[in-house]
Amino acid sequence: MSKICRNGIPFLSFSAISRSSSAITVRVYSSSHSNMSISAKGKFGVNSKLENVKCLDDAVTLFRQMVRKQPLPSVFDFSKLFKTMLNMEHYSAVVSLFREMQKLGIPINDFILNIVINSYCLMHRVDCGFSVLPIYLKNGIPFDVVTFTTLIRGIFAENKVKDAVNLFKRLVREKICEPNEVMYATVMNGLSKWGHSQKTLSLLRLMEQGNTKPNIFNYNIVIDSLCKDRNLDAAISLLNEMNKKGILPDIFTFNSLIDGLCKFGQWEKVRTLFSEMLNLNIYPDVYTFNMVIDGLCKEGKVEDAEEVMRHMTGKGVEPNVITYNAIIDGYCLCGQVDRARIVFDIMIDKCIEPNIISYSTLINGYCKKKKLAEAMQLFHEISQKGSKPNIIIYTTILQGLFEVGRIGNARKFFAEMLSTGHVPDLYTHCTLLKGYFKYGLVEEALSLFNELERKTENADIEFYNVVINGLCKNGKLDKAHAIFEALSLIGLLPNVRTYTTMISEFCLEGLLDEATDMLRKMEHNGCLPNGITYNIIVQGFLRCNRISEMAILMKEMAGRGFSFDATTTELLINVIRENPSVLDMIPELHLKNKQ
């Protein structure tokens, strides 16, 4: 497999391109050039035949007819066929037929080559896409901005952000290709997708200084990226900057900003943006309202969300399944599962078909309220409606069965899930392990754990946390500690939850020195303790009346901005009540007491 070499493209030097003859001098084609070319009338009359291409076999049959035709259909006819196949997502077939064209010596054009490169990129074989570039040179076909935009998009799709940026920089620096708004947007999108919002903003600033000025599409990408990165102040500042430059925002601009503000609960700013939209004669669409409704529901303001839904209906914007799902979820989060069911039924009455998320949300709500009969009724309803429950729904009900102690039913349900062909994911297995440990089925849990450890290659630390915690809760500290110590051998780093679980169990067993050693070990390994960790170990020292060590930990804890929780405070008050002299051992508490 060829790879992107240091100069950007294998088999080809950019410096060689810039010194080549006029026949292969780089020039930029606009999208209209390709559209005009492809609309040129061919002798074969491919337009009418393309209407009958419904599948890959139809496309291949038409290609065979075309290559046998004398004289050959025009290159534009072949372009149209390849474009149709690309739209049908038959990428490998495009490449295969292109190779056949080459063997037969059929003329090709830039449009066909760009489609082939795009096919390779969509197959995540951007290296093969680069291998098409020498064909341009061989046939005297200039590269265009579409060629390099497609390659850059393909590189980003393979998560090679640095390579994509380096190619873009080289194109600009060596004047190989003048980037247009689409190429800039492609780079911005790629950077945004992988969380580089500041680099996206920097690219916008670079664009503003060049010949190609940013349009609303470029600004929208940057604003959306900043909002997703929670940098709302910068996003709003950019909106104000657009207004000053006379670049009018559109519905996508406002949707990005409103989505970001809703996630932060900044409802006054949301109202301001709504007013600004209306002043510009931009009217909220269903996506805008859904963002507001979902944000309100996640904050527990479900009645406000329903009021927004009534408002959107009054404005002629019809709620969709996403709208209803948000409100169903909101009521479930508030524990009002009966209200959620009413909304679910209203949705059906309005001829809006529930989707798998609707069922999953409501089933989860029933399971959390331990209403397993209602959950199972909904579960069976999914199949009756012609859909199939997904692994999330199976796992939710499995968890619900364990919650109410129906272990036998849980086992039977899991076996049923396997019989339907569903493959349990790591979360499903963790649900099983938690259930087994909760009811003291340690041997069964360990048997499953050992089996999964042999089979699973991508087990994460949370999987091991479930096992370590389960063993500790069942008094198997030695086994838990052995698994903890083995984590480094399999390349997994314990997180704060792993360490805190071990510290908690050491404290409960009165092994305070071991708990302290674990606390120091986690810091040494770069995992900082949190407030829960400190409260647990302080409680351990209080229970054993080791006040001097507790005082040291208390000072350390306060220095890191953590405070006592209710349990720690109650224990400390009880110790002081029995032995008031403890106050003298802790000057900080003594001082506060005097105040």
Image (cartoon, rainbow, N blue to C red):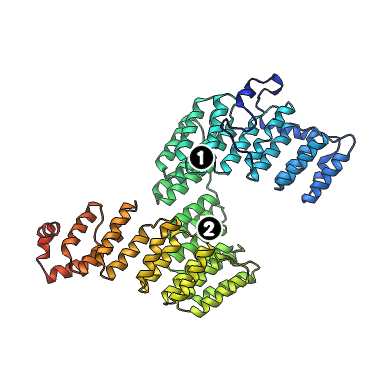
Q: Please say if the residues under marks 1 and 2 sit with CB atoms less than 8 Å apart.
A: no
Report x, y in % for residue 420: 63, 70
The answer to whether one can see residue 562 in this image is yes
- What amino acid is at disc 1? Leu
Residue placed most toward the observer, 242 or 213: 213
Q: On the rendered structure, is 360 left or right of 369?
A: right
- Distance from disc 1 to disc 2, alpha carbons, whole Å, reads 30 Å
Q: In the image, what residue occupies the spot 47% across and 53% down?
A: 292
Residue depth check, mark 1 versus mark 2: number of the one nearer the observer: 1
Q: In the image, what residue occupies the spot 35% across and 70% down?
A: 477
Q: In the image, what residue occupies the spot 51% across and 36% down?
A: 219
- What amino acid is at disc 2? Thr
Badge number at residue 456: none
Q: On the rendered structure, is 491 left or right of 20?
A: left
Count of numbered badges drawn on the protein: 2
Q: Mark 2 points at which residue?
A: 323
Callout 2: few (<14), some (14-19), or many (20+) C-alpha neighbours within 10 Å? many
Q: Mark 1 points at which residue?
A: 191
In this view, which residue lies farthest toward the right?
70
Give the secondary structure at mark 2: helix
The answer to whether one can see residue 277 in this image is no
Report x, y in % for residue 69: 89, 38
Query: On the rendered image, what quadrant is the N terminus found in?
Result: top right
Report x, y in % for residue 560: 25, 52
Residue placed most toward the observer, 80 or 339: 80
**Quarter assignment of residue 40:** top right
Report x, y in % for residue 418: 59, 71
Give the secondary structure at mark 1: helix
Give the mark nearest the N terminus, 1 or 2: 1
